[in-house]
Image (cartoon, rainbow, N blue to C red):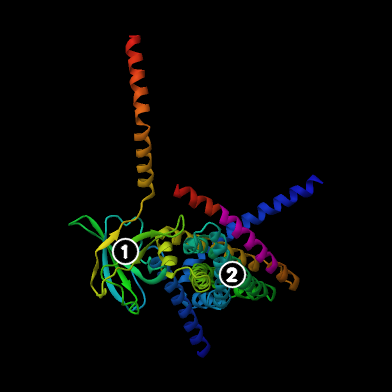
Amino acid sequence: MRANRTLEIGTGLFVLLGFAALLFLTTQLPASGVKFGAPRAGYHVSAEFDNIGDLKVGAPVTMAGVHVGEVEGIRFDSKDYKAVASLRVDSQYNHIPEDSYASIQTQGLLGGKYIGISPGGLDSYLKDGSRIEQTQSAIVLESLINKFFANYSSKGGGDGQGQGADNQSKAESRK
Amino acid sequence: MNHGGNGFILEGVRRLGAVTIFLARLLLESVPALGRPRLLVHQIYNAGARSLIIIMLSGLFVGMVLGLQAFNLLQRFGSEEALGTAAALGLLKELSPVITALLFAGRAGTALTSEIGLMRATDQLTAMEIMAVDPLRHVAAPRFLGGVVAMPLLAVIFSVIGLYGAQLIGVQLMGVDKGVFWSQMQGSVGLRDVTEGVVKSLVFGVACSLIAVHEGYHAEPTAAGVGLATTRTVVASSVITLLLDYVLTAAFLQRET
């Protein structure tokens, strides 16, 4: 009877562990919004961006390259068509000027996005619930390339157009 | 000379047929075996709970090695942030089903084969038959089912521990940002990747348990015969696992595109 009991407890523990692992994998790996564990201490600020690129929840917030917090949530503001990122900043970094400047930057060449905060000059500091007013959106590589080519072709544009016109006149004359 | 080759092929076909018939009989007997949960629990304990330590230890080290290797490789391209993605996909889809199956074959498969083989050698199975107790239902089927249930659970545990190991190396030792590690992983790992791993390990579980039970059940009733059957279990399970892994991977990739 005694041996039977330990056997059943062992099996129960094993199955429980297995399903706990399965639950972890299915809820934590694909971003599902389910969070385990206590929320970390810190204060929350928000920042509005025109375009956040592929910034994800959990991305770091840095100042001068040092990790000071993380992105806790991203939502779309349907009133002024902007993305609102809510950031959690560790409570020990409580001397960030209110007029600081938040920009979305890229790690490495292909890396993920993160938010870099450059300090402003005011004496009043960011606190729980305040908003960062000055922001810079993510740089989208495609739009940069588009701009570059638009510039390029408008510079050499006369040439292309001239040729087009030329061809057209040739075709006309052939008629 | 040609005759020897033919005999070898014929023996292979016969063996395949025998295993298939055995599988069909096992599946038939599995339904009544489910009606005896106590036997099943005992086998899940034997195959699963007692393999837990070796699985967890291996998972930790495989994850740590994966963390080191992937970090080293990704660093060359300046994209260490992809470490979480690389570790999660590698573990979920390949490493944890395959390594769990190989360890399972070595740890639980051998135990199954030698146990049933020894029952055969000491005429316990024959005695059961004489008492009108079907040994297939009472000995083979619960062991087979126990293995099938235990394998996916073991593989999932392996994945989680492996991820922890990769995170330990990547975040704690190499200094990848923890938030980036997880958010990049969550951005690129889908539920289908988890499913793929579970389906794989379920198939491996059927294959490895079937081979182990079959080899034991049909072992030659001598000491040498049981030894030979145990060896064959490990060899056949490992080869079949790797072969099935290729087939399944190809099938899953096909479905994705």
Q: Mark 2 points at which residue?
A: B104
Chain letter for mark 1, please: A
Q: What element carries label 2?
A: helix
| Magenta-highlighted residues | B230-246
Q: Residue furthest top?
A: A175
Eyeballing the image, is B117 above or below A78?
A: below
Q: Mark 1 points at which residue?
A: A102
Q: In which quarter of the image is residue A111?
A: bottom left
Taking the magenta stretch, the answer to whether it contains residue B92 is no
> Label 2 is placed on what type of residue?
Phe
Taking the magenta stretch, the answer to whether it contains residue B231 is yes
Residue at 36% in and 64% down: A116
**In front of the other: B101 or B31:** B101
**In front of the other: A157 or B238:** A157
Residue at 56% in and 66% down: B66
Left or right: A81 as drawn, with respect to B209? left
Q: In which quarter of the image is residue B129?
A: bottom right
Residue at 28% in and 70% down: A121
Residue A40 locus on image (x, y percent): 35, 77
Residue at 47% in and 62% down: B81
